Image (cartoon, grey):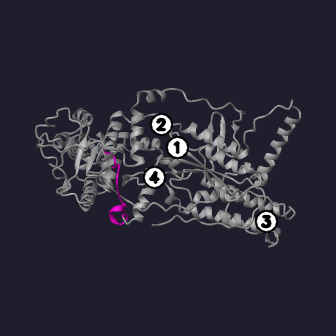
Amino acid sequence: MTHRPSTPVSSSSSPSSPGPSRPSTRTTTPDISSLTLSSSSVRDPAHPARAEHAALLELAASIRAFGTRADEHLYAAPVIDWHAPRAHRQNGITGLQRFEGTVVRELEAVEAVSASAPPGEINSNLVYLRAVWDEVVAAPLPLVGICPFVEHAGVQVKVDVVCKGGDEWVKVNTVKESRLLAEFHEQDSYINSDYDSDDGSEHAPAELTNSVIKQAQALVASACAVRPANPPTVRMVLTRLSPDVTYADSRIAGTFDALRSLGVVLAFGPRTPPPIPPPRTLVPSLDVVLDLSIVIALCCDTSHAPLPRDDAELEARYRPPKSVSVDGAVRLAAHTTTTSDLRDQLRAEMAHPLVPDLVARLAQAQATARARGVADPQPVFWVTQEVKDRLPALVDIMGGESERARARALFGEGGDFWHGSRHDDPGLLRDIRIHILDPADRDGEAPGVPAPRPSPPPPVEPETAFDRAVLDVCDKFLDPTFQRTLLQPTRPRPARGKRLARAPGARRESPSLAVQGLQGSPGSRLPSEHTVRTMRAAAARAATLLTNNRGAVGKVLREVGVWTGAVSGAATDIERAAAAEREGEGEGQGQVERARIWVVHPSSLAEWRRREVEDAHRAALANARNITPN
C-alpha cells in the first residue's frame, strides 16, 4: 500500500498573529528558484525574518513538488477509452496554482519588508498558509479545490480545502487564546455598561458568540444551501487552541461545544495523509449494453472493409476524382464535412480497430470471471427495445447492402454477420448476437434466436458512488421539469460596482474563484433521451455500457462531477479499495475494477459512400483512357 507523501514543512516559530496577504494583480506564479536569501537582513541568522523566509521557501517547494505528482490525486471515472484515456478524469485541483502564487508572493513580501522593518516586527501569513497546506496534503480524496469562495444568498464564504469529492469543507482558523479573551472582554464591557444603566432587574445570560462561532455558522449555512439534501461536513482546524488545555475563561471550552452543536468536526492539528488509491485495471463486465451508436458501428463498412494501405488510399477512400489524366494521375475533389469525418473515423479504425479491441477486452473479462470461479463465462450483448426499434429505419435509409445484412444478422434474423468482412477469425465474437433487455415479444426476440434466450441482468443496488451518481444524473436528464429549466434565462450577473457581502473569514482576493462541481451545470444541449435511457439501463444492471458517443458520456460525467473531482461519496469507494489492498485483496483480482463505460471511436454507415466513390474513380479512369490525344 502506498501512502501519500505528507511533504512536511518547517515547524519553526511564527509571529504572534498572521498578517494579511499583500494584494497583487499578478496572474503568473513566480519562479521560486530565484527567491534566495538576497537581502542582508534575511541572510542574518539572528533576524526573525530568516526563519520565516526559510519556512515559506520550504512550503513553496513542497507545493511545487505536489504539483508534479498531481495525477496521483485526481479522480478518474471507471471508463475505458483507448483513443482519449484522459478525457474522463478530473481536470485538475482548483486553486492549486493560485495558492502556490500566494505563498511565493508572501516570500517576496517577507524579503522586501525585512530590509526596512525593525527586528521583531516581521509579520506574515506563514502560520495560516502552512496549516492550509497541511490539510491539503492530508485531505481525503478526491481533492476538489484549495481556497475557493462559495456564494450563497449574496454572501461569500471562503473554504480553505474542499475534499472527499465535495463532501467535506475544511476551514483553518489560527485564532489565539488572547484574541478570544479580547473578544470576551469587549463583550463583557458592553454587558456591564448595559447593567449599569438599567433598573436593576434580572437578565438572562448572554448567548455565547465570537468570531470563530460566527465563521462556523456561515460555513454551515452555506453548506446546507449549496447541497440541501446532503450538505458537506464542515471541518474546522483550530491550530493555536487545544482541547487538552484548561483555559482560564470557560467560554473557550464552551466555544468548542458550540461548534460541535452546529455539526462542525473540530480538529486541532493536521491529520495523517490517507493512502493513494491502488493502481487498477478496468475490465468490462460479461454483460455489455450497447447504445445505438455502437450497434451502427458494429455494422458499418469502416469496421469490416479492407483498410487503406497508406495515407494516399485513406484520402481517396471517400473523395471522388476531380480529374484524371491520361496516364492515370488522379486529382481528388476537395473534402466536404462528411468526407473529412469519414476519413477521420477510418484513420481511428486504422490506429485501433474496433473488432480486435472488443475481442481483447472481452477476453480479459472472461479471464477475470474464470479467476473468480465462474464456469464457462461468455460475454452477452444487450440493447433496449428502443434501440432495436430505431435501428432498421436508420440502416435502411443510410446503410449499404452489407451493412443492412449485418444489422439483421446481429439480431438473429438470418445471414452470417461476418460475411464479406476483413476479419477472418473474429474469435469469441464468431457467434455474436444482440439480445433485448426488455423485449416487446416476451416469447422470443426474433425467429432465428435460439431458445432459451439469456436471462437479462436484473436491476441491482448501486455498488459505488459513481454508479449512484450516474443513475441520478440520467434520471435528472430525463425529467421533463429539469428539461424545461434549461429553457429559462440564466440569473443576471450583479450590477457593476455592486459588492457581495462576505461572511467572517472571507477575503477580498479572487472573488471569482468558486467551488466548481458542487451544484453541477448541465450543458446547453442534453444527450438524446434514448442514449440516456441506455446508459441508465447499463448502470442499473451493473453492466458495462459500450458506446462511441463520447460527447454524451462527457455531458453525463460533467454533471456527475468527474471533471472537478466533486463526486459525492467517492471517498468511501477509495477507502474501500485501499482497505481491500491492505487486507491482501489488492494482489491480482483486487486491482481489477469493472468498467462502467467503454468508449470506442465513432463510425458511421459509409458503405454507400465508398462504393459511390469507387464507381466514380473507375468511370473517370475509363473515360481518361478513352481520350485520344491530338
Residue 440 against residue 551 in the figure, above or below: above
- Identify the residue position indicated by label 4 in the image: 572
Which amino acid, by three-letter code, is at mark 2? Pro
Which amino acid, by three-letter code, is at mark 4? Thr
Name the quarter where the C terminus is drawn.
top left
Residue 522 has which mark? 2
- Identify the residue position indicated by label 3 in the image: 49
Q: Which of 438 and 412 is in front in this view?
A: 438
Q: Which of 388 and 541 is in front in this view?
A: 541
Which comes before the other along the chain, label 1 or label 3? Answer: 3
- State if disc 4 and disc 3 touch (CB < 8 Å): no
Numbered range of the magenta stretch: 585-603
Mark 3 neighbour class, 10 Å CA radius: few under 14, some 14 to 19, many 20 or more: many
Q: Position of residue 291 (x, y in %)?
A: 30, 41
Q: In this view, does 278 lie to the left or right of 132?
A: left
Q: Nearer the viewer, residue 33 or 16?
A: 16
Q: In this view, does 322 lie to the left or right of 472?
A: left
What is the C-alpha distance between the residues marked 4 and 1? Answer: 18 Å
Q: Which of marks 1 and 2 is in front?
A: 1
Question: Is residue 596 found inside the magenta-colored segment of the image?
Answer: yes
Q: Where is residue 156 in the image (x, y as percent from the top left)?
A: 66, 40
What is the C-alpha distance between the residues marked 3 and 4? Answer: 43 Å
- Identify the residue position indicated by label 1 in the image: 517
Mark 1 neighbour class, 10 Å CA radius: few under 14, some 14 to 19, many 20 or more: many
Q: Is mark 4 on a helix, strand or loop?
A: helix
Q: Nearer the viewer, mark 3 or mark 2?
A: 3
Q: Is mark 1 on a helix, strand or loop?
A: loop
Q: In this view, does 415 lie to the left or right of 593?
A: left
Q: Which of marks 4 and 1 is in front?
A: 4
